[in-house]
Amino acid sequence: MALVEARSIGLPAVAGDDPRVLILGSLPSVRSIAQQQYYAFPTNAFWNIMGALVGAGKDVEYGARLEKLKSSGIALWDSLASSRRPGSLDANIDHATAQPNDIKAFLAANAGIRLIAFNGRASQESFLRHIDRDLALTWPQINQVLLPSSSAAHASMGLDDKIKAWSVIMQYLDTN
């Protein structure tokens, strides 16, 4: 009997009342899915980056981190809702079985979003492949930026350089 690879099923979107920036990952890691927490893998730099930018670092309890993102105008989700994927590496996502999140409905419901920030190339490629190749035509008011992946698998860039690259999102936020 052949072993069927389990489907990875992502997490719900995190968004406050008036998000300005939507950060999209590709599909949560096995650990993130098991813990039901975005970016739960300890060596992923996402929360270190958010700590530096908006005070939502690893030293803050997870629920409070999400609240800080929401109050800062940041929404968090993934390009894919589910897919077969052995392990956690984006390279192992089976795009033939991938189901995208309904990003178009999310954008329609959150008209204040002005930037989609892709957390790494896999997120952007999944978005373009499964969701919308013509976002600029559909939503001309929304800019897009490809950011360096926060994953430890992409360690060629140090944390300080990642923070600097990610700081582009700050110009879209209402920071007090």
Image (tube, rainbow, N blue to C red):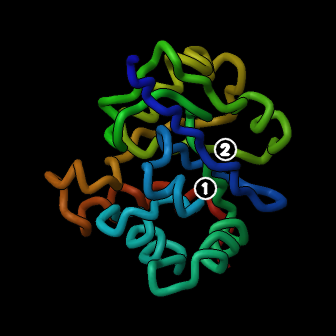
* Viewer-closest of 57 and 164: 57
Disc on res. 114: 2
- Residue 87 place in picture, x, y as percent: 34, 41
For this view, does 166 lie left or right of residue 20? left
Q: Which residue is located at x 30 percent, y 30 percent?
A: 91
Q: Which residue is located at x 51 percent, y 20 percent?
A: 128
Asked if 66 appears above or below 3 in the picture, the reply is below
* Viewer-closest of 167 and 63: 63
For this view, does 175 lie left or right of residue 5? right
Residue 51 visible in image: yes
Amino acid identity at mark 2: Arg
Q: Residue furthest left?
A: 156
Give the secondary structure at mark 1: helix
- Residue 32 place in picture, x, y as percent: 49, 57
* Viewer-closest of 111 and 67: 67
Amino acid identity at mark 1: Tyr
Question: Distance from label 2 to label 1 (Cα)?
Answer: 7 Å
Residue 108, picture quadrant: top right
Give the secondary structure at mark 2: loop
Q: Residue furthest bottom?
A: 59
Q: Are marks 2 and 1 in contact (CB under 8 Å)?
A: yes
Residue 125 visible in image: no
Disc on res. 172: 1
Q: Which residue is located at x 44 percent, y 24 percent?
A: 4
- Residue 68 place in picture, x, y as percent: 65, 75
Count neighbours of disc 2 (C-alpha within 10 A) and say few if under 14, some if 14 to 19, many if 20 or more: many
Quadrant where the N terminus is found in the figure: top left
